[in-house]
Image (tube, rainbow, N blue to C red):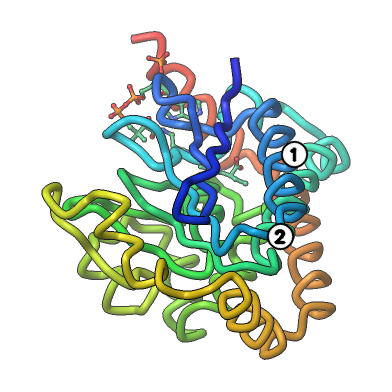
Amino acid sequence: MSLVLLDWMEDGYAVITLNRPEKLNAINHQMVQELDEALDLVRKEDHVKFLTVTGNGDKAFCAGGDLNEFHGNLEEDEAYDLLAPMKNVLYKLATLPIPTIALLNGQARGGGCEIATACDFRYALKGTSFGFIQGKLGIAPGWGGGTLLYEKVDKQAAAHWLMTATMYSTDQALRIGWLHKVYSDKEWTMETLLQPFLHNSQEQMTWFKKQYLNSLKLDELSVRMEEETISCSKLWESEAHKEAVQKFMLSRKN
Ligand SMILES: CC[C@H](C(=O)O)C(=O)SCCNC(=O)CCNC(=O)[C@H](O)C(C)(C)COP(=O)(O)OP(=O)(O)OC[C@H]1O[C@@H](n2cnc3c(N)ncnc32)[C@H](O)[C@@H]1OP(=O)(O)O
């Protein structure tokens, strides 16, 4: 069964859906692979105006890396080998030649916030919450999402969120500019959410995104995302990290 769905919409855009709702769309190895393949397919289609990324279910956009797979007693180099593929996927998402919009249907934690941050824009359903909580697990973001956060919001706001590792409400996320819009349940339809973009041609949307990417130093971005993965791999072996993951695992058994 596909854990990442890719749909081509009549109005000329594509939708990627994280499709593991029973696990709050937590990202496992299969999803990393399927996300990579889906992005390659979107990149090949020259009629697609923009891409949206969302989660299946009404509880979460994405609860981060799968703690059964992304957390174990791993040495630094094993942790790097585990983290690097998703970092590469997020670089591919962040530099896709068409605009990308994260439709946050529910909470996002850890790597889930990294995926959302790799998108150009973030729209959220009212009442959802978000947190770069890796700091509370004894690590730091490892898929490049911390690096991307510094590109998307005020640098002090990015540093504060990463260091405090707290959950933000939609209001708090709007205030720092991480969220662009918040919608009620009633408004949460593709037609309402995407109306502002649908009138644009594919050529316009490709140019708008090219102009935006020109403003980023992509070579530097790639180096900084790689450095983030290396640093997270070093933190992976900490006792604090091992204890935090163990605590989550034990809580599953109760
Ligand atoms: C580089 C990325 C970075 C990394 O991987 O190192 C990270 O993403 S670190 C952050 C990892 N994510 C988390 O720490 C969040 C863990 N999940 C939770 O704290 C809770 O599930 C919560 C608060 C999101 C929701 O709690 P709630 O009580 O509402 O639901 P459940 O906990 O019962 O979850 C339902 C179901 O989903 C499974 N689940 C949730 N999150 C994960 C996860 N990250 N990995 C694997 N599985 C997850 C949970 O086990 C439940 O399934 P069940 O079969 O009933 O055990």
Residue at x-position 63% and y-position 38% = 239
Residue at coordinates 30% horizontally, 60% vertically from top-left? 193
Counting labels gives 2
> Residue 169's image quarter?
bottom left
Name the residue tied to disc 1.
Answer: 37
Q: Position of residue 243 (x, y in %)?
A: 54, 32
State left or right for residue 65 relative to residue 132: right
> Dots 2 and 1: beta carbons under 8 Å?
no
Label 2 – label 1 distance at C-alpha: 16 Å
Q: Residue at x 51, y 84 (%)?
A: 155
Q: Is ligand 1 closer than 8 angstroms to the Cβ of mark 2? A: no
In the foreground, 254 or 186? 186
Dividing the picture into quarters, in which one does residue 241 lie?
top right
Give above or below for 185 relative to 101. Answer: above
Query: Residue 158: image x %, image y %?
Result: 48, 75
Q: Which residue is mark 2?
A: 46
Q: Give the position of the N terminus as an image quadrant.
A: top right
In the rendered view, would you say 115 is above or below 207? above
What SS does tag 1 mark?
helix
Viewer-nearest residue: 19 or 209: 209
Front of the two marks 2 and 1: 2
Secondary element at tag 2: loop
Where residue 100 appears, as percent x and y from the top left, is 54, 63
Amino acid type, residue under disc 2 in the picture: Asp
